C-alpha cells in the first residue's frame, strides 16, 4: 500500500506549533509558576494531530494505464489542371481521390485535415476525427475550386507548415494536448517553380515527415479540358500549341527524403505499405497514472486531537473558552474535509444560463455562459452538450471558424450514452457540411476576380485554351437569403428537439437533486 497527503499546504501549520513551543519555553524561563510541561505537551500533540488531519493522509495504490490519443494527419492533394491528364486511370485527379479514400479506410485513431492546392493552397477541412466527412469532401474536389493555376510546391509546403504551427498554437493556448502531425502529399510532382531544399528541411526540423505519392507517367501527355459546348479539347499554351504535362517522381522523392518521410508510386498495392508506415508514426499514446484510494486516515487524526484536548480540559478548568474554540475548529475542519469540492453544480448553472440566453436571442451572452460551462465541467456529457450549443451560437453570430472548432470538440468528446452520442455526432456532421457550404459560397461571392493564369504543362496559355471552368469565372450561384434561412432553421429545429428532451428529464432529476434540468 502506498501513502500520500492530499493537502500538503496544511503542513504550514507546523509554524504555529513552533511559535507555541517558543512561547511555552519563554514562560518556563520567566514565569515558572504558570508553566506546566503536561499542558504544553498535550496542546502541542493535539495541534500536531489536527494539522495531520487537515493534510488528509490517504492509503492506496498508483495505477498506470495507457491512454490512446488521436494522431494528426494533413493530406495535401494537387488539384491543378495537369491532374486532369489521363495517364493514370481514369485520371490523375480521380486516382488521387480513390487512393486517399482507400487509405483513410485503413487508418484508425487519427484526425485528418484536407489541404487542396494548385498555385497556392487552403485548409478545406480542419483536423477532425470524422473520417466519413473527409471522404465526402474528397469527392467534391476538382481544379475548379483552386484559387489559381500554376503549381508551386515550395510555396505550398511553406504555407502548409504555417497552418500547422497556427493550429498547434491554438491547441496549446486552450490547454489541450498537441500531437506532432504527419503530412501526406499526393501530386504529379510538376512544379512551375523549382522546390528549394529549405522547404522540406523545415519539416525535418519540426519532426514532421512528409510522405509523398507520385501520380502520372514521365511520358508527356496532353491535358484534356471541357469546352463551353460540353465537348472535350486539349489545353493550349500562348503560342497555340497543345500543352503537355509529365509527372516528376524525382521531385517528390527528394521532398520525402529531405523531410524524413518516404515516397510511393501510383499503385493501389502501395496503400498497405503506406498505411503501415503512417501507423508507425501515428501510433500515439501516453501513460496516465492515477491514485486509487482505499483508506482515509484523517478521522483518526482528528479523534486523537480531540482526546488530547479533552484530557487537558478535564485536568485544568481555566482557559475553558480556548479549549471550546479548538474543538469547534476541529469539528468544522472534519466536516469540511469529508466532502470533496464539486464544480459540476456551477457548470450546470452556466449551461442553463447559456440556453436561456440563446432562447432570448442574446447570442453573445449565450456564448459566454456556454464557454464557461465547458471550461468548468469535468462531466463529458455536460461538455458535449455545451460545445454543441456553443457551435450553434457561433454559427448564428457568423463566427464560422469558431463554430467549426466547437463542433469538432463536441464530436471528439466521448460520453457513456452511446445513443445520445451517435445522434449528436450525426447532427454535428450535417451541420459541418452545411457550414462548409455556406463558407464556400460566401468566399465565392466576396472573392476578387482571379487573374488569368496558365494551366499545368510547358508554357502559358490564353484565349481558346483557357479553362472555362476556371475559378476566375465563379459561375456557381451563391446561397440565397432564403436558403441561408432554411439552414439556420434546420439547426434551430435540432435545438428545439434537444430542449424538449431536456424538459422531459426535468421531472426525473428534480427528485434526486435541486438542480435545473438539462
Image (spheres, grey):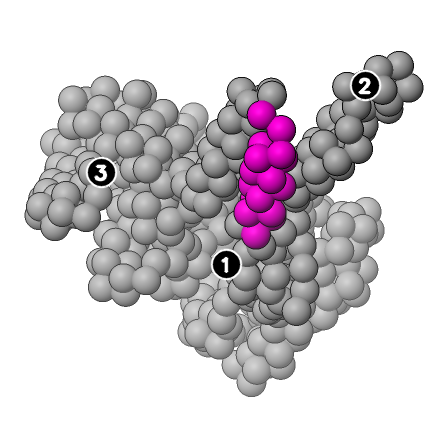
Q: Residue at x 71, y 60 (%)?
A: 209
Q: Residues within 10 Å of mark 2 (few under 14, many from 20)?
A: few
Q: Quadrant of residue 288?
A: bottom right
Q: Residue at x 44, y 70 (%)?
A: 101
Name of the residue lying farthest toward the bottom:
269
- Frontmost of labels 3 and 2 is 2
Q: Residues within 10 Å of mark 1 (few under 14, many from 20)?
A: many
Q: Secondary structure at mark 1?
A: strand
Give whichever of discs 3 and 2 has the lower sequence position.
2
What residue is pinned by disc 2? 33
Name of the residue lying farthest toward the right:
29
Q: Give, as a single range, the part of the protein colored magenta.
A: 300-317
Residue 238: x %, y % from top left? 56, 43
Q: Is residue 309 magenta?
A: yes
Q: Secondary structure at mark 2?
A: helix
Residue 4: x %, y % from top left? 67, 54
Above-or-below relation of 493 to 264? above
255 on left or right of 54: right
Towards the viewer: 365 or 22: 22
Q: CA distance from mark 1 to mark 3?
A: 36 Å
Q: Residues within 10 Å of mark 3 (few under 14, many from 20)?
A: some
Give whichever of discs 1 and 3 has the lower sequence position.
1
Residue 104 visible in the displayed image = yes
- Frontmost of labels 1 and 3 is 3
Towards the viewer: 464 or 49: 49
Q: CA distance from mark 3 to mark 2?
A: 60 Å
Considering the image in quadrants, where does the C terminus appear?
Answer: top left
What residue is pinned by disc 1? 111
What residue is pinned by disc 3? 515
Amino acid at each position: 500500500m502506498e501513502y500520500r497527503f492530499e493537502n500538503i499546504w496544511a503542513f504550514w501549520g507546523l509554524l504555529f506549533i513552533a511559535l507555541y513551543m517558543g512561547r511555552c519555553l519563554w514562560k518556563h524561563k520567566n514565569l515558572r509558576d504558570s508553566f506546566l510541561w503536561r499542558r504544553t505537551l498535550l496542546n502541542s500533540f493535539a495541534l500536531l494531530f489536527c494539522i495531520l488531519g487537515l493534510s488528509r493522509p490517504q492509503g492506496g495504490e498508483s495505477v498506470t494505464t495507457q491512454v490512446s490519443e488521436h494522431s494528426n494527419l494533413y493530406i495535401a492533394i494537387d488539384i491543378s489542371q495537369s491532374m486532369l491528364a489521363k495517364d493514370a486511370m481514369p485520371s490523375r485527379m480521380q486516382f488521387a481521390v480513390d487512393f486517399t479514400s482507400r487509405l483513410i479506410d485503413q487508418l484508425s485513431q487519427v484526425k485528418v485535415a484536407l489541404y487542396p492546392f494548385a498555385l497556392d493552397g487552403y485548409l478545406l477541412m480542419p483536423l477532425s476525427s470524422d473520417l466519413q466527412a473527409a471522404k465526402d469532401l474528397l469527392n467534391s474536389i476538382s481544379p475548379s475550386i483552386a484559387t489559381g493555376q500554376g503549381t508551386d510546391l515550395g510555396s505550398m509546403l511553406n504555407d502548409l507548415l504555417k497552418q500547422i504551427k497556427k493550429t498547434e498554437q491554438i491547441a496549446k493556448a486552450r490547454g489541450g494536448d498537441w500531437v506532432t502531425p504527419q503530412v501526406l502529399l499526393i501530386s504529379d510532382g510538376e512544379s512551375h517553380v523549382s522546390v528549394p531544399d529549405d522547404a522540406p528541411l523545415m519539416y525535418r526540423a519540426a519532426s514532421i515527415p512528409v510522405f509523398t505519392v507520385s501520380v502520372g507517367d514521365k511520358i508527356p501527355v496532353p491535358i484534356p479540358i471541357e469546352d463551353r459546348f460540353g465537348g472535350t479539347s486539349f489545353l493550349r499554351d500562348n503560342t497555340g500549341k497543345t500543352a503537355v504535362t509529365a509527372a516528376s517522381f524525382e521531385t517528390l522523392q527528394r521532398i520525402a527524403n529531405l523531410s524524413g518521410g518516404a515516397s510511393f508510386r501510383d499503385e493501389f498495392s502501395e496503400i498497405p505499405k503506406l498505411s503501415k508506415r503512417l501507423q508507425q508514426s501515428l501510433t500515439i499514446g501516453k501513460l496516465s497514472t492515477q491514485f486509487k484510494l482505499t483508506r482515509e486516515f484523517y478521522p483518526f487524526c482528528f479523534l486523537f486531537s480531540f482526546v488530547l484536548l479533552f484530557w487537558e480540559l478535564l485536568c485544568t478548568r481555566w482557559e475553558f473558552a480556548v479549549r471550546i474554540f479548538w474543538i469547534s475548529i476541529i469539528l468544522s475542519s472534519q466536516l469540511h474535509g469529508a466532502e470533496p469540492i464539486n464544480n459540476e453544480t456551477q457548470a450546470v448553472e452556466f449551461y442553463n444560463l447559456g440556453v436561456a440566453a440563446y432562447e432570448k436571442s442574446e447570442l453573445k451572452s449565450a456564448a459566454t455562459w456556454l464557454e464557461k460551462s465547458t471550461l468548468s465541467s469535468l462531466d463529458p456529457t455536460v461538455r458535449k452538450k455545451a460545445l454543441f450549443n456553443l457551435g450553434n451560437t457561433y454559427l448564428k453570430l457568423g463566427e464560422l471558424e469558431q463554430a467549426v472548432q466547437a463542433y469538432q470538440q463536441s464530436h471528439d468528446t466521448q460520453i457513456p450514452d452511446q445513443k445520445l452520442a451517435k445522434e449528436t455526432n450525426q447532427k454535428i456532421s450535417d451541420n459541418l457540411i452545411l457550414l462548409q457550404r455556406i463558407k464556400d459560397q460566401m468566399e465565392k461571392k466576396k472573392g476578387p476576380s482571379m487573374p488569368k493564369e496558365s494551366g499545368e504543362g510547358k508554357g502559358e496559355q490564353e484565349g481558346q485554351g483557357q479553362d472555362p471552368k476556371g475559378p476566375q469565372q465563379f459561375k456557381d450561384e451563391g446561397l440565397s437569403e432564403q436558403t441561408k434561412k432554411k439552414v439556420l432553421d434546420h439547426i434551430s429545429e435540432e435545438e428545439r428537439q434537444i430542449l424538449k428532451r431536456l424538459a422531459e428529464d426535468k421531472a426525473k432529476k428534480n427528485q434526486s437533486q435541486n438542480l435545473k434540468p438539462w
